[in-house]
Amino acid sequence: MIKVEQLSSLSSPRRQAILKRSSDNLRENMDRTIEILAALKKDPEKELAREYGPAMKKAGGKFDLKRFLVSEAEFEQAVGQINSSLIDALGLAYFNIYAFHKAQLGEAISSAEFSEGLLAGRFVRPISKAGVYVPGGRASYPSSALMNIVPAKAAGVKTIVVATPPGEDFCARPEILVACRIANATQIFKLGGAWAIGCLAYGLGGLPKVDKIVGPGSSWVTAAKLAVFGEVDIDQPAGPSEGFIIADDSADPTHLTWDFLSQLEHDPQAAAVLVTTSEKLAKEVARMVNQEVPQADRADIIEKSLANAAILTTPSLQEAFDFANEYAPEHLQVVVKRPMAHLGKIENAGSVFLGPWSPIPAGDYASGTNHVLPTGGSARAFSGLSTDSFLKKTTFQQLTKKALKDISWTITTLAQAEGLPAHAKTATVRLAEKPKKK
């Protein structure tokens, strides 16, 4: 059961509980994750056979590293296992996601002369190889395949390697394979958890070594990504899904009820918060949520995630936005009169959904924006996945002799202060050289 509370009257422990939302067991998993990664490094075939050998045998045949790679025959079989409407929906989603991310690309090179003879600039290059993890455990998320592969493709990444867990038949989920094919992934491997992340990071088990690993997953996957960070880059330590709604009396309570429940059905640790200036709206949403939960398809999950939910009232929209900025949600819905006028109040959010016709699933699936977003308050410092996530930005400079002379005093003074005389000499030795005779 959920009840209406006043934002200003929340006790300090209750306020902190809402802000903290769910907690994961990353620390508990980290020790075991490190053990798995160490075993992979020591003898990858032995460790992979220990974990996947029984499943391969059950599915028919012996353990073989080559069976991790999805074959063309498996792709063809997958296409026949899903209906054409899903393929069409994935195609339309791909089109919008690609168009949005391609439009993010700026100039490949930029430069300016900041003083006479001192040219400085930056050029942009994509990383060479990206690893994408696509979950396949509690639920199947073909949309996640699109959201992680497409920005890499739009950025110009040449090799995109996908890892996704196999089922009991040692096949990947067909809808995920079709999504990967639509998004033009280079290779797909049937591997899950820390084993997948380790193989991508270290180039083991027949998988190529990648430069960066992206994609959501369980706390085991997140722990593994954190453990290999430095060996490769990662996107961010993603956690359970969360939605924050700011609404006034113009909002429809039925819409908000399903917006609220749509976040809570993700996972037992998911979170949802509604802050509204209308007490009537708050009470009606609370009543409808409590009414719908027992009969919901994922009632067992929602009943647990309600522990991370809240419906709050406040007389001030400004107070609602202040609390949203403190919460720093993954998804922020603004369902108020003239929502665009309030955009300037938003400081911390992964993705923003404005107005009554912009539910969060629009961004999850079809509008083109990315649904791989910062969670757990990390929107204070992190951005969602984008083409920038797959780009390297390299600076360059070219100086004339006069430009070097103009800044040589700065170079030598700072180099000497830091006890690095050879640094200073690189400038002075050039300026002391006599002109060469023609």
Image: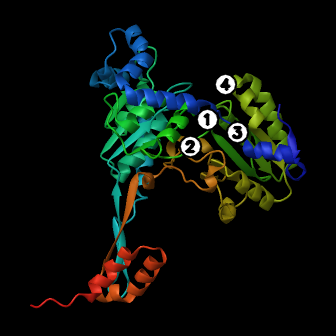
- Tell me the number on the disc at residue 237: 2
Q: Are marks 3 and 4 in contact (CB under 8 Å)?
A: no
Q: Are marks 1 and 2 in contact (CB under 8 Å)?
A: yes
Residue 274's place in the image compared with 290, above or below, is below
Amino acid on which disc 3 is placed: Ala
Could you say which is closer to the camera, residue 355 or residue 146?
146
Answer few, some or many: residues within 10 Å of disc 2's Cα (few below 14, many 20 plus, some between 14 and 19). Answer: many
Among the 4 quarters of the image, the one containing residue 421 = bottom left
Where residue 134 appears, as percent x and y from the top left, is: 46, 33
Where residue 238 appears, as percent x and y from the top left, is: 57, 41
Q: Give the residue at mark 1.
A: 26
Question: In the visual, does 436 lie left or right of 235?
Answer: left
Q: Earlier in the sequence, mark 4 or mark 2?
A: 2
Using the numbered discs, state the Cα–Cα distance from disc 1 to disc 2 in whole angstroms: 10 Å
Under circle 1, the secondary element is helix
Under circle 2, the secondary element is loop
Amino acid on which disc 2 is placed: Pro
Residue 209's place in the image compared with 314, above or below, is above
Q: Give the residue at mark 3.
A: 271
Where residue 150 appears, as percent x and y from the top left, is: 40, 45
- Residue occupying image coordinates x 32% and y 34%: 187
Q: Give the residue at mark 4.
A: 298
Under circle 4, the secondary element is loop
Among the 4 quarters of the image, the one containing residue 74 = top left
